Amino acid sequence: MTSSEHSERFGRIGLWNTALGSTDPSRRAEITQVAAEIEELGYGALWIGGSPGLDQAEPLLAATSRITVGTSILNIWQHEARDVAAGHARLDAEHGGRFVLGLGVSHAEAVTDPRAKEELRQRPYTAMRSYLDALDAAPRPVPASGRALAALGPKMLGLARERALGALPYLVTEEHTARAREALGPGALLAPELKVVLETDPGRARTVARAYLERYLGLANYRNSLLRLGFTEEDFAGGGSDRLLDAVYALGDTDTVRERVEAFLAAGADHVALQVVTADVPHALPLAEWRALASALPL
């Protein structure tokens, strides 16, 4: 696909949020109302964080009519490929191809099964390739155009280019985006996530940013990705150095966010998934911030 085709399908800017995938019945009405407003605001895609399943995408698809909805990402160790393929086919048919299956190998630190943990440490690329083979072999296969990979390193980016629509990199910078575009080539989707703290006081912004980033800095695949970008172990201490925070977050007002989005797009992204971080993540639906960004960004 071309960049313009990706933009037509996803828009240039979307939202990444974990609470949109909440399975709490008491939040269902709130979530569907918010999803409908997000669509009206003009965002191009909704990305459900927190290792969601397909059932968490269905209410968002039902509440909307235009916006693309994706998992970012479905954990391949928690869902059988045959079941995922059947669910994808149903959602694809019922909602006009608006669902995209984002897939990831998760983290060795988060996997409890000993066999899976060892395979993930040693062969994450092989594990993902085998899962894609299973999706292809299912009675109703998931086409490459209906799936994307949470790819960071060169091998997984290559797999995203060859076997999927493209890549959904998480916790990355403009430099990583440029490298990913080179690895993916011109036709594959590149939709990085970018964290946002809408706070003009630098000290308060960094306090919120560090509190959230610390959990990710304990995961080896993110640390390794950041080390490849030139950060050091010292940058990971205490929730992240100022240098690291400034690289992986947009900290400040809506103008700051717009500038960072433009920088990611200039580096080769087709679409940028904004994750608004507040003191209440991952439970918050920061509608006020999403409204403010919609007024300031070229949606």
Image: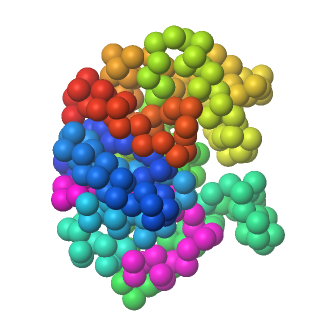
**Residue 87: % across, % down:** 39, 77
**Residue 48: % across, % down:** 44, 53
How many numbered badges does the structure rendering display? Answer: 0
What residue is shown at x 48% (from left), y 42% (from top)? 284
Relative to the observer, which residue lies in front, 280 or 252? 280
What residue is shown at x 33% (from left), y 16% (from top)? 255
**Residue 220: % across, % down:** 73, 44
Residue 247 as seen in the image, left or right of residue 127:
left
Q: Which residues are magenta?
A: 64-87
Question: Where is 76 relative to 44, above or below?
Answer: below
- Dividing the picture into quadrants, the one containing residue 235 is top right
Residue 238 as seen in the image, left or right of residue 4:
right
Residue 281 as seen in the image, left or right of residue 44:
right
Whether the magenta-drawn stretch holds residue 77 is answered as yes
Relative to the observer, which residue lies in front, 194 or 281? 281
Q: Residue furthest front?
A: 26
- Judging from the image, the colouring scheme is rainbow
Relative to the observer, which residue lies in front, 264 or 282? 282
Question: Where is 22 relative to 213, above or below?
Answer: below
- Dividing the picture into quadrants, the one containing residue 185 is top left
Question: Where is 252 relative to 278, above or below?
Answer: above
Whether the magenta-drawn stretch holds residue 189 is answered as no
What residue is shown at x 31% (from left), y 48% (from top)? 34
For the question of whether residue 280 can be seen, the reply is: yes
- Dividing the picture into quadrants, the one containing residue 40 is top left
What residue is shown at x 57% (from left), y 67% (from top)? 76
Q: Quadrant of the C terminus?
A: top left
**Residue 105: % across, % down:** 61, 60
